[in-house]
Image: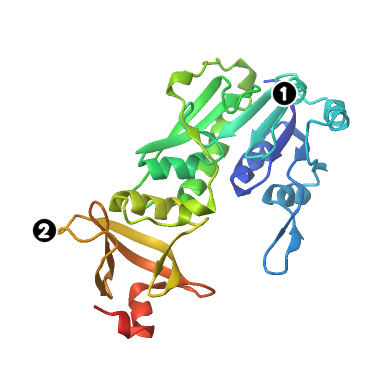
Amino acid sequence: MTLKRIIFAGTPEFAVPSLQTLLQSKHTVIAVYTQPDRKAGRGQKLQASPVKQLALANHIPIYQPLTLKDAQQQAQLQALQADLMIVAAYGLLLPKAVLDTPRLGCINVHASLLPRWRGAAPIQRALIAGDATTGITLMQMDVGLDTGDILKMAECPILPEDTGQTLHDKLAILGGQLLAEHLDNIEHLPKQPQNSAHAVYAKKLDKEEANLHWEEPAESLARKIRAFNPWPIAQTHLFDQTLRIWEAQALPAPPVTPQIGEILHCQASGLDIGTSQGILRILKIQKAGGKIISIKDFLNAHPQYKQ
């Protein structure tokens, strides 16, 4: 094993286990690249990314450029003389000049089994599609969008109760574990080209997608509700107000086909709504500015809606 000088590039919570793996290894993390601090919370105060917070706690030099396309930023990165750059949910495109700078190139910790779900939202898209399995891919980066050669993969089953949050957390840990398993020998891993004929694009999530449409099958709506938890959170207009839907389940269609969007049942057990195929039973909701509550608690406060 040759000890490596490593640059880590990542921003959100997903990237933290991968950085922790590097910090616990025999190699040296010489710098961390992360997105500039963003305003967050009610006070809209500047907040450091989870990766920056970990880097600060470990006294690692931090770089937060707005872009890496700038020649000055590229020269600064080159001056670090890194052997390897590990990237996990960084959020900035790496131009060819950056990809070619580290001696061993740049390796991405990607949250899908490539070439399925290239792009920004692989975790949520796998849930929406009803995939039974997803995973982590270690990929040698090139100038394309998640098109580089595959180095290693690890699978993760998608459970019926998984949400965007729970699947994110499992894959973040798996990413760190896969990296730990192969980091020492990473330059000797065989490279497997992707079959682009099987590629599927995971486009970025849009708030507009959070609006539920009852013309869709109940199973599809239930998957979206799980995928959009914790963001952007599925929502619908009921009882003359907009309600965010945090938990629901799909039920088989009744003997008599209900009208699409019809409220069939509103009791403590759940709020049943007719769809194009089956019934969606809503279990947990949130009113604007309110807490997440069960349908039972909602009806206790609004008994007029019970039916």
Q: Can see residue 3?
A: no
Q: Residue at x 44, y 57 (%)?
A: 211
Mark 2 — residue?
255
Name the spot of residue 138 as percent of width and height, x first. Answer: 56, 28
Q: Residue at x 67, y 40 (%)?
A: 91
Name the spot of residue 186 as percent of width and height, x first. Answer: 62, 22
Name the spot of residue 58 as percent of width and height, x first. Answer: 76, 47
Mark 1 — residue?
99
Q: Is residue 207 left or right of residue 39?
A: left
* Camera-side residue of 114 and 253: 253
Q: Which amino acid type corresponds to the residue marked 2 in the rendered image?
A: Pro
Q: Which amino acid type corresponds to the residue marked 1 in the rendered image?
A: Leu
In the image, residue 141 above or below residue 34: above
Q: Residue at x 88, y 31 (%)?
A: 72
Name the spot of residue 52 as percent of width and height, x first. Answer: 74, 48
Label 2 or label 1, whichever lies nearer to me, is: 2
* Camera-side residue of 146 and 76: 146
* Camera-side residue of 26 and 178: 178
